[in-house]
Image (tube, rainbow, N blue to C red):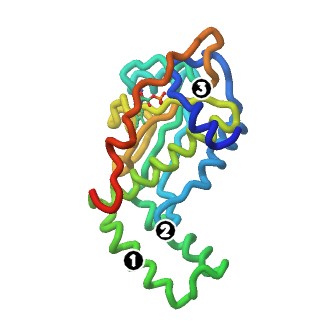
Amino acid sequence: MELVEAIKERRSINFFEPGREVSNGKLKELIELANLSPSSFNLQPWRVVIVNTLRRKAALRKCAFDQPKVEEASAVLIMIADPDGVELNSGRVLDSWEELGYMKPDMRETYVGMMKNLYGEVDSLKRKFFAVKNTSLFAMNIMFAAKGIGLETHPMDGFDEEAIKKEFNIPDDKIIPMLIAVGILKSDITLLPRAFRRDVGEFISFEAY
Ligand SMILES: Cc1cc2nc3c(=O)[nH]c(=O)nc-3n(C[C@H](O)[C@H](O)[C@H](O)COP(=O)(O)O)c2cc1C
């Protein structure tokens, strides 16, 4: 599917075909495509918990205000933003830059300093923004990649973050920007037309705010 077509056709699907499985291989393919997302300094500060068994989807539904699509979708992805992404991944990012010739070895410390300066201490608000911003871009790519491989999605922030962390053993310092339901559109459903979008003239300006 062409990208423009995928953008035009992506919808948040409320009605998934219950009982339709999407293989672990296909889910991995989806995540691998989205993993090509851009990220700040290429730091990729995300994790994903894939929930695709009936028992665990039922548990997740309880944490997500009883939204039926959590159980009806083939899988639900718990998108996790990791403020620790700088410490975890910067070494490998810089190794790769060095190996590939993006960066001379003597620039390494300069880059480490820039990251620390831009993204602050691990428990700071700056760092949380960094993690959520990048994980949200990754999440959007999951939704477009899904269209490209014949899957539908639905992003959700209607959930109790603390309850999900407890149920799925997610450490306290992580942030869950959204869940993404993934699956196949229910066969007898016709979607309502896409709802209102603001006219872009309302929010764009040239040169200054
Ligand atoms: C971050 C985010 C959280 C959302 N949370 C929910 C949710 O919890 N439940 C729900 O039914 N829809 C949720 N939505 C879906 C929006 O309502 C939907 O994207 C919007 O109405 C536009 O519809 P469309 O995606 O089909 O174009 C969410 C969307 C986003 C981007």
* Residue that protrudes farthest toward the bottom in the picture: 106
Q: Amino acid at mark 3?
A: Thr
Q: Nearer the viewer, mark 3 or mark 1?
A: 1
Q: Are marks 1 and 2 in contact (CB under 8 Å)?
A: yes
* Image position of 95 (left or right of 161): right
Residue corresponding to mark 3: 53
Dot 2: element: helix
Q: CA distance from mark 3 to mark 1?
A: 42 Å
* Image position of 55 (left or right of 209): right
Neighbour tally class for label 2: few under 14, some 14-19, many 20 plus, Cα within 10 Å: some
Quadrant location, ligand no. 1: top left
Label located before the other in sequence (3 or 1): 3
* Mark drawn on residue 114: 1
* Residue that protrudes farthest toward the top in the picture: 188
- In percent of the image, x 65 and y 30: which residue is there? 151
Neighbour tally class for label 1: few under 14, some 14-19, many 20 plus, Cα within 10 Å: few
Residue corresponding to mark 2: 41
Instruction: Name above or below for residue 107 compared with residue 178.
Output: below
The x and y percentages for residue 4 are 62, 41
- In percent of the image, x 69 and y 36: which residue is there? 24
Point out the image quarter for the N terminus.
top right
130 or 51, nearer to the observer: 130
- In percent of the image, x 50 and y 34: which residue is there? 180
- Is the residue marked 3 within 8 Å of ligand 1, measured from its CB? no
Neighbour tally class for label 3: few under 14, some 14-19, many 20 plus, Cα within 10 Å: some
The x and y percentages for residue 129 are 34, 55
